[in-house]
Image (cartoon, rainbow, N blue to C red):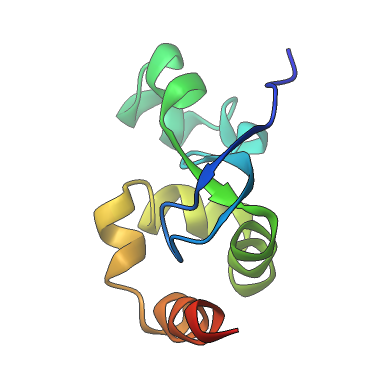
C-alpha cells in the first residue's frame, strides 16, 4: 500500500515541502530473522518519520537499509548521527 504524500515541515530540516514517509525499519528488512525477533510486524510497518525527499535521499545514500534498521530505527538515533546531521544543517541553509 503506497502512502499519500502530504505537505508539511520535514522532521529533520524543518523545510516546508511535500513529505515522504521514511520507514525507520526499512521494508526490505521485514523478513530478516534479526528484525523479526526485535520488532513486531506492526511496529516495522508503522514506525517512521515524515521527511522531505532531499533528506530522505541523503539518508539512503549514506547507509544501507540493514544499517538503517539496526542502528537508526528511531528519530532520536538519526538526530545523533554526525553524517546525517551535517547534511541536515547544510540543507537548512539552502
Is 23 left or right of 76, judged from the image as shown?
right
Q: Quadrant of the C terminus?
A: bottom right
Quarter where residue 19 is shown: top right
Quarter where residue 18 is shown: top right
Q: Is residue 34 above or below residue 61?
A: above
Q: Is residue 57 above or below residue 33?
A: below
* Residue 11 location (% of width, % of height): 41, 52
Is 37 left or right of 25, judged from the image as shown?
left
Q: Quadrant of the N terminus?
A: top right
Q: Residue at x 52, y 61 (%)?
A: 15
Q: Is residue 45 above or below residue 59?
A: above
* Residue 52 location (% of width, % of height): 61, 54
Is 76 left or right of 16, judged from the image as shown?
left
Q: Is residue 90 above or below residue 21?
A: below
Q: Give the camera-side residue of 20 and 15.
A: 15
Q: Residue at x 56, y 52 (%)?
A: 66
* Residue 22 location (% of width, % of height): 56, 42
Which residue occupies the extreme right position in the image? 2
* Residue 2 location (% of width, % of height): 75, 19
Q: Residue at x 31, y 47 (%)?
A: 74
Q: Residue at x 46, y 83 (%)?
A: 83
Amino acid at each position: 500500500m503506497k502512502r499519500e504524500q502530504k505537505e508539511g515541515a520535514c522532521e529533520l530540516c524543518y523545510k516546508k515541502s511535500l513529505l515522504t514517509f521514511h520507514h525507520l525499519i526499512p521494508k526490505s528488512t521485514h523478513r530478516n530473522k534479526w528484525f523479526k525477533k526485535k520488532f513486531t510486524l506492526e511496529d516495522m510497518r508503522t514506525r517512521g518519520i515524515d521527511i522531505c525527499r532531499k533528506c530522505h535521499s541523503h539518508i539512503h545514500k549514506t547507509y544501507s537499509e540493514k544499517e538503517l534498521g539496526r542502528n537508526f530505527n528511531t528519530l532520536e538515533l538519526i538526530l545523533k548521527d554526525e553524517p546525517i546531521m551535517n547534511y541536515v544543517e547544510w540543507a537548512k541553509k539552502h
